[in-house]
Amino acid sequence: MDTFLMDHREANKAAMLQPNTETMRPPAGPGAYELRFQSLFHTGKALAFPCNARGDVQLDSLSAKALENYLFARAVVGHEYATPVIQPRE
């Protein structure tokens, strides 16, 4: 029985060291994703902003109007817009 436990532990240890290639993605550069705020009241209306895989938007790279829209969307989440979703950019 000890041999079984040892083999089981070794198998688990080996599995933990192996990368999960099914969920691995190549690193994406800035702007490969978008942070999308879907309107709660108007189907098809949304605001989307370039971001990284974590949803970080580089505010300095936005135009004045885009920055205004981004700050507005963040301020009215739950009232006008849904919680934003990170998705690959098309």
Image (cartoon, grey):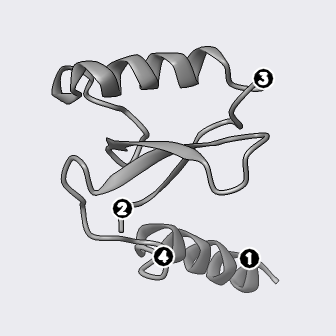
Q: Amino acid at mark 1?
A: Leu
Specify the quadrant that holds the N terminus: bottom right
Q: Amino acid at mark 2?
A: Arg
Is 70 located above or below residue 40 in the figure? above
Of tags 2 and 4, the one toward the viewer is: 2
- Do residues under tags 2 and 4 come within 8 Å of each other at their CB atoms? no
Which residue matches tag 3?
79
User: Dot 3, how many residues are within 10 Å of its Cα: few (below 14), some (14-19), or many (20+)?
Assistant: few
Question: Disc 2 and disc 1: Cα gap in Å?
Answer: 47 Å
Name the residue nearer the viewer: 44 or 23.
44
Question: Disc 4 and disc 3: Cα gap in Å?
Answer: 48 Å
- Do residues under tags 2 and 1 come within 8 Å of each other at their CB atoms? no
Of tags 2 and 1, the one toward the viewer is: 2
Question: Disc 1 and disc 4: Cα gap in Å?
Answer: 14 Å
Circle 4 SS class: helix
Residue 42, image x, y percentages: 73, 46
Which residue matches tag 2?
89
Circle 3 SS class: loop
Of tags 3 and 1, the one toward the viewer is: 3
Question: Disc 3 and disc 1: Cα gap in Å?
Answer: 55 Å
Which residue matches tag 1?
5
Q: Amino acid at mark 3?
A: His
Question: Disc 2 and disc 4: Cα gap in Å?
Answer: 36 Å
Numbered label attached to residue 14:
4
Circle 1 SS class: helix
Is 69 located above or below residue 36 in the figure? above
Residue 53, image x, y percentages: 38, 49
